[in-house]
Image (cartoon, helix red, strand yellow):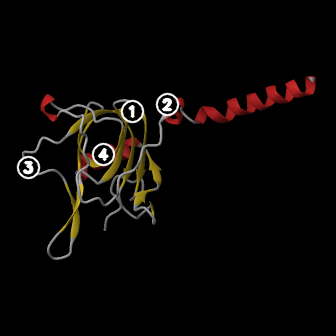
């Protein structure tokens, strides 16, 4: 009996040493359904009232891009994949004068997965071949600096409890 209790205490202590690297908040984020990476329609958010100014999207994953960051709050909008008549394709945002945009604070433990490496100037590639999504975890600073210097980049943006908790770049050629 005593050896069983000792084993349980040691196992609990070992788990306590290993688990602090995982944030309790990150572990609590549910797995939301991912949209099609190259979806041809803007994702709907039927409960969002765009007439009330910029505010956070409901919980879930949005195919979009961050257009601006000010004071720890990111403005972002949905995007869709558009084919041209000549067979070329690219991501596009809502039409000009369309107010389809959101604003959410960036969580302090946000995870950013780059498709182009962790340097400010995108170079090389680091993405999952099957999904065309960034696989290299980088600091939030890289995302913010890239957005400031090079403009918006397509990504899957995960919002949980009103904050952006994950950004995963979409690889495009």
Residue depicted at x 47% and y 36%? 29
Q: Rounded to the nearest whole Å, what is the CA distance between mark 3 and mark 1?
A: 29 Å
**128 to the left or right of 96:** right
Residue depicted at x 50% and y 35%? 26
Residue at numbered disc 3? 96
- Mark 4 or mark 2, whichever is nearer to me: 2
Q: Position of residue 41 (x, y in %)?
A: 23, 55
Residue at numbered disc 1? 107
Q: Rounded to the nearest whole Å, what is the CA distance between mark 1 and mark 2?
A: 10 Å
Residue sitting at the far bottom: 86
Q: Earlier in the sequence, mark 4 or mark 2?
A: 2
Mark carried by residue 39: none
Q: Earlier in the sequence, mark 1 or mark 2?
A: 2
Residue at numbered disc 4? 145
How many residues crowd around disc 1 within 10 Å: few (fewer than 14), some, or many (20 or more)? some
Q: Secondary structure at mark 3?
A: loop
How many residues crowd around disc 2 within 10 Å: few (fewer than 14), some, or many (20 or more)? few
Q: Secondary structure at mark 1?
A: strand
Task: Say which quadrant the C terminus sits in.
Answer: bottom left
- Mark 1 or mark 2, whichever is nearer to me: 2
């Amino acid at each position: 009996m005593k050896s069983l209790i000792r084993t349980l205490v040691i196992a609990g202590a070992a788990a306590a040493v290993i688990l602090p690297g995982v944030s309790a908040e990150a572990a609590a984020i549910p797995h939301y359904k991912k949209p099609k990476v190259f979806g041809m329609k803007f994702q709907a958010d039927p409960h969002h009232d765009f007439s009330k100014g910029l505010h956070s999207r409901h919980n879930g994953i949005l195919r979009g891009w961050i257009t601006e960051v000010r004071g720890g709050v990111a403005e972002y909008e949905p995007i869709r994949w558009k084919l041209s008549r000549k067979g070329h394709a690219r991501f596009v945002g809502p039409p000009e004068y369309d107010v389809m945009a959101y604003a959410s604070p960036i969580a302090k433990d946000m995870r950013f997965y780059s498709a182009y490496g962790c340097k400010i100037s995108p170079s090389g590639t680091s993405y999952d071949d099957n999904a065309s999504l960034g696989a290299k975890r980088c600091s939030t600073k890289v995302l913010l600096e890239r957005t400031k210097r090079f403009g918006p980049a397509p990504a899957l943006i995960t919002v949980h409890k009103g904050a952006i908790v994950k950004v995963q770049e979409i690889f495009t050629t």
